[in-house]
Image (tube, rainbow, N blue to C red):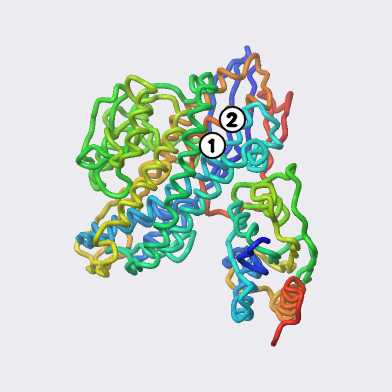
Amino acid sequence: MTNFKARCLILSCGNTLRSDDGIGPWLSEWARERFSHEPGVEVITRHQWTPDLAVDLSAAETALFIDCAIDIGPGEIQLKEVAPASADAILGSHHTDAPALLGLAEAYYSIAPRRALLLTIGAGSIELGETFSAVVQQALPAAQTRLEEAVASLLDRTLPR
Amino acid sequence: MSQTITIDPVTRLEGHGKITIQLDGQGKVAHAHFHVTQVRGFERFAEGRPFYEMPSLMARICGICPVSHLIASAKACEAIMSVRIPHTAAQLRRMLNLAQMVQSHALSFFYLSSPDLLLGMESDATKRHLFGVVAANPELGKAGVALRRFGQHIIELLGKKRIHPGWVVPGGVTEPLESAKRDEILALLPEAYKNIKLALDWYKKIADGFKAEAEVYANFPSHFLGLVNEDDSVEFTDGALRLIDPSGAIVEDGITAIQFPEVIGEAVEPYSYTKFAYYKPLGYPEGSYRVGPLARLNIAKTMGTPLADKELVEFKQLSAGPVQSSFYYHHARLVDILYGIEKIEEILTDEKILDTHVRAQAGVNRLEGAGQAEAPRGTLHHHYKVDDDGKIVWANLVIATGQNNNAMNKGVAQAASHYIKNGKFTDGALNRIEAVIRTFDPCLSCSTHAAGQMPLALSLVTPDGEVIDRLIR
């Protein structure tokens, strides 16, 4: 039986100096507080996702990735299952995406989270700035709710308020 | 009819650059240039800022080697303050700089270059990355990932952030080391030793298979510059600079940071935003030299740590004098890592390492100051002038990549001349020319944000703009 370091690993990325690109770090830091009494929940906030995170993923039972997206509408919230990429996937040395990280964990350590979700919030602006666009600001409560639901789903139980 | 080949951008580098190769009417290489296509402007916008802000500001130049900028900048500020920092602070900074070197070298060797070395220069470009390494040698890949985490974790433990830590300040560091953190780092050492041994053993097994590459990968006589201690051992954070000539003879020694501009000049070329450093007595470009791992091992007579010293002896057997082929930057990089791990262990067992006096305080006592350190890819120099209020009125930075710039250009020309015949080239030839640049591990601009996948296009273009051949990655 595997001894997981985390039952649910929350892994965000983004640049807090590029407006809505900072939504991932903002949400994960909120999650750190929100789930501070949940011993199985761990949070890692990064500027970029790099290949070394495969080590953390290999020790997590489940994972929730959080990122900003530019291929969905501004303020739109999307939660979807994510699977490990195959070995044919292109892997960047400076930045990788969620499927590639899961694939790397599987390839190197022969284990990846049994289930992983990707929560994305559509960007209204990724220009220089430390505040969110109005549309993303408005979406924050809904994004927090989706994040809570995602963690509850990954932990397979209802979370206390 | 002459032709121009453009490689834009060059892949698996720290930043964005391109290569152009001009062919003559016979299809032979006439000129080759490595262009750095970003402009940053840090020296100019620092003007008017209080000098004590400089370390944090300058660290933002780079996301891979911010610690070197922090240290060189803090040392320049300390020259302005006329203070000597406490022993413990100096040791803690040295450890931080070494941790950064380990993680940066791990990125360069395992992530950026090992796909070429493990899978082959001519292998399928779509598989030349970490996944390809996983498939071919998972233990090597895991060792690289672990060594990078090792360095980054130490930076995070000491500086609270993996990138752009603010812990190094003019006068020392903001907080002493806690015993729990010391013990945590000590516990990481056995695995780090195991991983670098695995990498060195593997590299030595495959290196002979790259003798042909070593012949043409920036393989020419040059001067070398780097920091050394008074006992001729390698130094990354303090010490003074030594310059050796192609035969290994010392031509300049004990160069302090403030003396640097008396010895080293900077030239500009119209095709690059990076300057070209040169040894002033020889002028430009004759006075061009190399810095970084290869230079450090060529210059030092000892590493100063037992395991790395054994490796240095072996390294020096590659050549009767200084090792001239830039291919051996890879080898030197691994020896650097081993040295870094040993030195970190030595620093952590310093009986004063937990002392709480880690910062000296002072105001403006001089109107000019300079600092230097070894960044992973070579010597880094910061030089500032301030007004009576301590505001920066002038700043100049000489980075390692600028000091290797001429050698990189010559290396591209050398490799291109060898691998491009009659104006024709293959994807493998393209990769080999890029691989020459990768040996230097230039850091063009890690701190800028890139979106999406970097494409690579190489075109043969006639003087009137007609594209006659094209490869796209």
How far, Cα to Cα, is label 2 from label 1? 8 Å
| Residue A150 in which image quadrant | bottom right
Please name the residue shown 60% across and 37% down the image: B10
Kindly indicate whether the residue at mark 1 contacts the one at mark 2 (C-beta within 8 angstroms): yes
Of residues B5 and B125, the one drawn nearer to the viewer in this rendering = B125
**Horizontal placement of A15 versus B390: left or right?**
right
**Horizontal placement of B394 versus A84: left or right?**
left
Q: Amino acid at mark 2?
A: Thr
Can residue A11 be seen by looking at this rendering?
A: yes
Please name the residue shown 68% across and 27% down the image: B427
Q: Callout 2: few (<14), some (14-19), or many (20+) C-alpha neighbours within 10 Å? A: many
B467 shown above or below B385? above
Q: Residue B331: image x %, image y %?
A: 45, 33
Mark nearer the N terminus (2 vs 1)? 2
Q: Residue B390: image x %, image y %?
A: 28, 65
Picture quarter with the C terminus of chain B: top right
Please name the residue shown 64% across and 47% down the image: A108
Picture quarter with the N terminus of chain B: top right
Mark number displayed over residue B404: none
Q: Secondary structure at mark 2?
A: strand
Q: Callout 1: few (<14), some (14-19), or many (20+) C-alpha neighbours within 10 Å? A: many
Residue indicated by mark 2: B20
Residues at discs 2 and 1 both on one chain: yes
**Horizontal placement of B269 versus A149: left or right?**
left
Q: Residue B417: image x %, image y %?
A: 56, 18
Residue found at the far front of this picture: A1
Of residues A154 and B323, the one drawn nearer to the viewer in this rendering = A154
Q: Secondary structure at mark 1?
A: strand
**Horizontal placement of B435 versus A152: left or right?**
left
Q: Residue B114: image x %, image y %?
A: 57, 36
Residue indicated by mark 1: B35
